[in-house]
Image: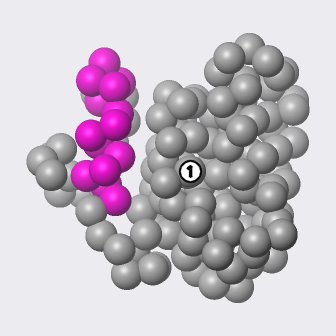
Amino acid sequence: MGLWAADCAEHVLPYFEAKHPQDDRPRKAIEAARAWVRGEIRCGEARAAAVAAHAAARDAVDPAASAAARAAGHAAATAHVAPHARGAASYAVKAAAASGADRESDWQYQRLPEHLRPAVSLAPGVTGSA
């Protein structure tokens, strides 16, 4: 779930980076999520990256930027508790919606490994159809 959560967060990361190009905390959180899955870092390091991404979200005024940073924070937090993957997906949908984009849930569903689909609830009405 960690890789899928990182993919969801990275997909909306441009909404944050467009407003805060010098702030790499959300990007580092996404990198931490992937590094944890690969066994390259410990849970505590991933959690620290998650906390930093959430701090970036609090610093962001733009709703899309804030939600994108929160998605990154939740992606990194999957190292601590796997259901944070749902938070990453949910905040990614919020980021996309705040910027006027839609179909984020469909994008997520198409990338969700089939064996994980029963464990992850996506936004209401998402059927996986594109």
Amino acid under disc 1: Glu
- In percent of width and height, residue 9 lies at 55, 51
Q: Examine the residues drawn in magenta and state their main secondary structure.
A: helix
Instruction: Residue 111: say if magenta.
Output: yes
Instruction: Residue 6: name its quadrant.
Output: top right
Q: In the figure, 123 relative to 58: above or below?
A: above
The percent position of residue 46, horizontal first and vertical second, equals 79, 34
| Quarter of the view holding residue 117 | top left
Which residue is farthest bottom? Answer: 61
Name the residue: 59% across, 60% down: 13
Instruction: Work out whether 47 lies above or below 107.
Output: above
Q: Is 115 one of the magenta-colored residues? A: yes
Q: Which residues make up the magenta segment? A: 104-117
Q: Nearer the viewer, residue 4 or 23?
A: 23
Q: Position of residue 45 (x, y in %)?
A: 87, 32
Look at the image and tell me whether residue 50 can be seen.
no
Q: Residue at x 50, y 42 (%)?
A: 7
Question: Measuring 50% from the left and 69% from the top, which residue is drawn there?
Answer: 95
Q: How is the image coloured?
A: one colour
Q: Please indicate, yes or no, whether residue 114 appears anywhere in the rendered image.
A: yes
Category of crowding for the residue at label 1, using alpha-carbon neighbours closer than 10 angstroms: few (below 14), some (14–19), many (at least 20): many
Number of on-image labels:
1
Rendered residue at 72%/51% (across/down): 27
Residue 113 x, y percent position in the rendering: 34, 26
Q: Which residue is mark 1?
A: 10
Residue 69 appears left or right of 64: right
- Residue 47, placed above or below residue 117: below
**Quick one: SS at disc 1?**
helix
* Left or right of 2 in this view: 115: left
